[in-house]
Amino acid sequence: MVSERGGNQSVERAAAVLNAFTLGRPALRVSDVAKEVGLGLSITSRLLSTLESAQLVRRDPVSQLYELGPSVLTMAGVALNNDSIYRQARPVAQRLAAELGLAANVAVLSGDQLFYLLNVEGHLAQKSFSLMGQRNPLHATGMGKCLLLGLSAQERVDLLGEEPFTAYTTRTLTGHEQLTESLTEAEERGYATEVEELALGRACLAAPVRNHTGKVVAALSLSGALSAIALDDRQDALGSVVIEAADTISVGLGYLGPVQAPSVG
């Protein structure tokens, strides 16, 4: 019988092998995986064979490269369809993308990054890949700023660490003071913006999504190329749209609006 430690080690190794496959490197040789996870070729080969038998990875018959298998998609579908935020947000995001032609995205907080739970592309923002499951920095994105609205100033400092933050363009906010000013503005108008802070030629608007307790649990954004989103001409209009859409999702999660303190008389 395999010891508890041995069983745990096998699971950890298998998880490390699966995590070796990324958007930038979706197909790998055995030697690539072995180098990435720090294991010998023999052990890595056996792990891949076991994972292949469970359809968690598959091997291309021509190139002999390994890639993630269909069982991963099955598990991802189960996880998504069991997620209340995803279920409430999906029809809303689909409608926005169809009506506006922009990308409609939903993200949640994951550590010190945002995690894409949903990504629907409109005809003006079509990509050959999905952002679902990918991560981005909080300080350089509209959705990230919305997720930070749910934290206190000290919690933001603890989460983001010391400045300067990583600069992705010359427009990226790299300090706590700059970020706090941007968050204050976002809180006042109900939505956050990001214009070429993460990538040149791209912009987005985002609004927070709240659960039944009023806590910010997700963010919804509209994004696209500068020419497609045209914030100079319609920022306020799109801001109203994204706020209303985020509120629709929030209501579906049980949010009833700000709690009013009882008057004292």
Image: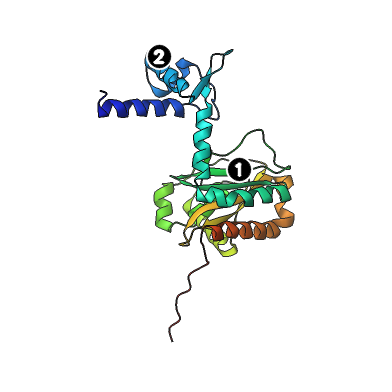
Relative vertical location of residue 64 with respect to residue 22 in this rendering, above or below: above
- Residue at 30%, 27% (x, y): give it: 7
On the image, the x and y values in percent for residue 55 come to 49, 24
On the image, the x and y values in percent for residue 221 come to 61, 50
- Residue at 73%, 42% (x, y): give it: 123
Q: Residues within 10 Å of mark 2 (few under 14, many from 20)?
A: some
Q: Quadrant of residue 31?
A: top left
Describe residue 193's horizontal placement relative to residue 180 as left or right: right
The residue that mark 2 highlights is 41
- In the image shown, does 123 or 24 lie closer to the viewer? 123
**Dot placed on the residue nearer the N-terminal end, 1 or 2:** 2
- In the image shown, does 188 or 221 lie closer to the viewer? 221
Which part of the image, by quadrant, shows the N terminus? top left
Which part of the image, by quadrant, shows the C terminus? bottom left
On the image, the x and y values in percent for residue 224 come to 68, 45
Q: Secondary structure at mark 1?
A: strand
Q: Secondary structure at mark 2?
A: helix
- In the image shown, does 144 or 221 lie closer to the viewer? 221
Q: Amino acid at mark 1?
A: Asn
Describe residue 237's horizontal placement relative to residue 158 as left or right: right
Measure the alpha-carbon separation of dots 1 and 2: 37 Å
Whether residue 183 is visible: yes
On the image, the x and y values in percent for residue 238 come to 68, 56
Q: Amino acid at mark 2?
A: Leu
Describe residue 154's horizontal placement relative to residue 200 as left or right: left
Relative vertical location of residue 114 with respect to residue 259 in this rendering, above or below: above
Q: How is the image coloured?
A: rainbow
- Residue at 63%, 34% (x, y): give it: 129
- In the image shown, does 69 or 148 lie closer to the viewer? 69
The residue that mark 1 highlights is 119
Q: Residues within 10 Å of mark 1 (few under 14, many from 20)?
A: many
Relative vertical location of residue 42 with respect to residue 89 in this rendering, above or below: above
